[in-house]
Image: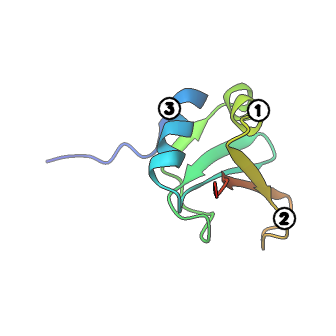
Amino acid sequence: MSVDAGPRKVDAEYAIEYLQEHPQAGLCCEDRRCWITPNANETDQRILLLDVVEADRLKDDPRLRLVSGIAHAGRSLWVVRRMT
């Protein structure tokens, strides 16, 4: 019988790879908590966790962009930029 351990903690390098492979995903931060959600339209779900230092490194990555006007006050969301 397998027990679901919940989201695992990852570093910025792993997180950006995940985000690039799953363009519907996003990086969410609220207070001092940061996580990767598998669907940027539903930011409550957490699949991967990052500590604040790793999340700050990830936010600085030019491949990501900040999404403005999300529904949750006090929460920020970054997604992979669309390259055209």
Q: Farthest left residue?
A: 1
Q: Earlier in the sequence, mark 3 or mark 2?
A: 3
Q: Residue at x 78, y 39 (%)?
A: 32
Colouring chosen for the image of the structure: rainbow
- Image position, residue 63 (x, y; %): 67, 42
Q: Earlier in the sequence, mark 2 or mark 1?
A: 1
Q: Residue at x 54, y 37 (%)?
A: 15
Q: Say whether residue 13 is left or right of residue 81.
A: left
CA–CA distance in space, label 1 to label 3: 14 Å
Tags 3 and 2 touching, CB below 8 Å: no
Q: Is residue 11 visible?
A: no
| Amino acid type, callout 3 | Tyr
- Image position, residue 42 (x, y; %): 59, 70
Give the residue pinned by disc 2: 68
Q: Quadrant of the C terminus?
A: bottom right
Q: Residue at x 13, y 48 (%)?
A: 1
Q: Which label belongs to residue 14?
A: 3
Element class at badge 2 = loop
**Nearer-the-camera pick, 5 or 17:** 17
- Image position, residue 2 (x, y; %): 19, 46
Give the residue pinned by disc 1: 56
Image height check: is 57 above or below 43?
above
Q: Which label belongs to residue 9?
A: none
Q: Residue at x 78, y 74 (%)?
A: 71
| Amino acid type, callout 2 | Ser
Q: Residues within 10 Å of mark 3 (few under 14, many from 20)?
A: few
Q: Earlier in the sequence, mark 1 or mark 3?
A: 3
Element class at badge 3 = helix
Image height check: is 3 above or below 17?
below
